[in-house]
Image (cartoon, helix red, strand yellow):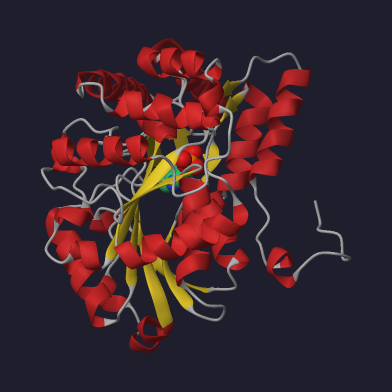
Amino acid sequence: MTAPARFTSRRVRAMPGSVFAAMDAAKSDARRSGLDVIDLSIGASDLQPPAVALDTLRAAVHDPATHAYCLHSGTAPLREAVADWFERRFALRVDPETQVLPLIGAQEGFAHLLLACADPGDAVLLPDPAYPSYFGAVAAAGLETVALPLRAERGFLPDLGLVDVADAARARALVLSYPNNPTAGVATPAFFDEALRFAERHDLLLIHDFPYVDLVDDVADAPSVLTRPGALERAVEIYSASKSFHMGGFRLGWAIGQADALAALARLKGAVDFNQYLGIQRAVAAALREPDEARRADAATFTERREVLVESMAAISWHAPMPRASMYVWAALPAGRRDSVAFAEGLARTTGVALAPGVAFGPSGEGYVRFALVRGPEALRQAVARIRAYLD
Ligand SMILES: Cc1ncc(COP(=O)(O)O)c(C=O)c1O
C-alpha cells in the first residue's frame, strides 16, 4: 500500500515497504486454489506458553489490583525476576532498579531505544540481512543506516574492520543480534569483545537484540555480551517473552544493560505507553522463575525440527547448513535460482509452502530463503516433498 500523501510525516514516508505483502497474496492464492498452506514464512512459535504463566495470568485477571495503570518502568517484581533469571543464566548480578527495563516486546523496545539514544541524522550500524522491523525503526528515528554485510564464510558475523572510519564516526549505535534472525548464525565471546572494543573506540551504544537466548542446542552458543568486560557501561541487551516463552501475542520483553540508555528509554516510554498489563508482567515473572529445564525441552523441539528439515532437504539435493540455534534455517536458493521473491512466491502459489524470501531481510539476503521451524516434523517433511515436486 502506498502511504497517503496527506498527514503523513517524512519519517513514515521513509519507512520501507515489506515484501511480506507479496507473500500474503501468494498464500491467499494458494488457499483459493484449494491447497492447505504450510506457512513457514513467519517466526511465530507454535509451542505453548509455560502453564505457570497462563495460570498466573488467569488469576491476575480477577485481581482488581492488576486493573490500574502501571506508571514507572514496569513492576519491581518483574524487574527482580529478570535480574534473578539473568544471574542464574549468566552468573552476573545486574541492578533491577537501574539496569533492567520491561518492554512491550523486543520490537517496541528496539524502536524506542533508537529514538531515546540517537538524534536525527546520526548513523546506525545495522547488520544486513536483519530482522525487517529494524529498517522501519531506523527510518522512524530519522537515522541513516550503515550496512554491515553478514556473509556465510564469516559465520554471519560482520567484519568490523571493513567499516569506513567516517561512517563509524557519525554513528551512534552498533546493532547486533545472535543467535541471528534470519541467518541462524551464533556469536562467540571473542567476537563480542571485538565488538565492544569497536564500540568503545567510536563511542557507540552496542545494542544486542537477544530474543533467541533460549533457542539453542548448547547455551554456550548464546553468550550474553553483558558478561564481557566493560559491557554494562556500553551495551543494552533486548530479550523477548515471544521467543523464550512462546508468548508473542502477549507483548512483553525486557532490556538489560547500560543504565543511562535505559533511563533515556524509560523517559521516552513515559510519554508513549504505560507499560504492559500488570497481569502479563506477573505471568512472565512467574515463567522467569521456573527452572530452566522447560526452556531446554523447548529448545530440543527446535533442534529436532532443524535436523528433520535440513536432512530432508539434503535428500533432495538442496544443501543448507545445520544451524545450532534460533528457529530458522537459512538456505541459499537451489541451483539456477537467483530471485528470492520470485522463488518464494512461485513456491507458495503452486504448492502452498510459504517461506520468507531472503531479500525481505535486506539486500545481502538476496539469493536465500528462510524457513521458520514453526510446524512439527511431519509438516516439515511434507513441505520438502512438495518442494521436490516443484523443483522437478
Ligand atoms: C531479532 C528479533 N527481534 C525482535 C523480534 C520481535 O520480538 P517481540 O515479539 O518481543 O517484539 C523478533 C521476532 O521475530 C526477532 O526475530
* Residue ranking furthest to the bottom: 166
Quadrant hosting residue 161: bottom left
Task: Tell me what residue is drawn at x 20 percent, y 63 percent.
Answer: 231
Relative to 224, 269 lies left or right = right
Q: Nearer the viewer, residue 162 or 92?
A: 92
Residue 375: x and y, percent? 46, 19
Task: Tell me what residue is drawn at x 44 percent, y 65 percent.
Answer: 264
Residue 350: x and y, percent? 66, 26
Whether residue 356 appears in this view of the structure is yes
Task: Tell me what residue is drawn at x 25 percent, y 47 percent.
Answer: 186
Relative to 88, 131 lies left or right = right
Residue 86: x and y, percent? 21, 41
The tally of labels here is 0
Q: Nearer the viewer, residue 231 or 386?
A: 231
Q: Nearer the viewer, residue 277 or 135?
A: 277
* Residue ranking furthest to the right: 6
Residue 160: x and y, percent? 27, 72
Q: Is residue 302 above or below residue 1?
A: above
Q: Nearer the viewer, residue 217 or 270?
A: 270
Relative to 264, 285 lies left or right = left
Whether residue 362 appears in this view of the structure is no
Quadrant hosting residue 11: bottom right
Task: Tell me what residue is drawn at x 13 percent, y 40 percent.
Answer: 220
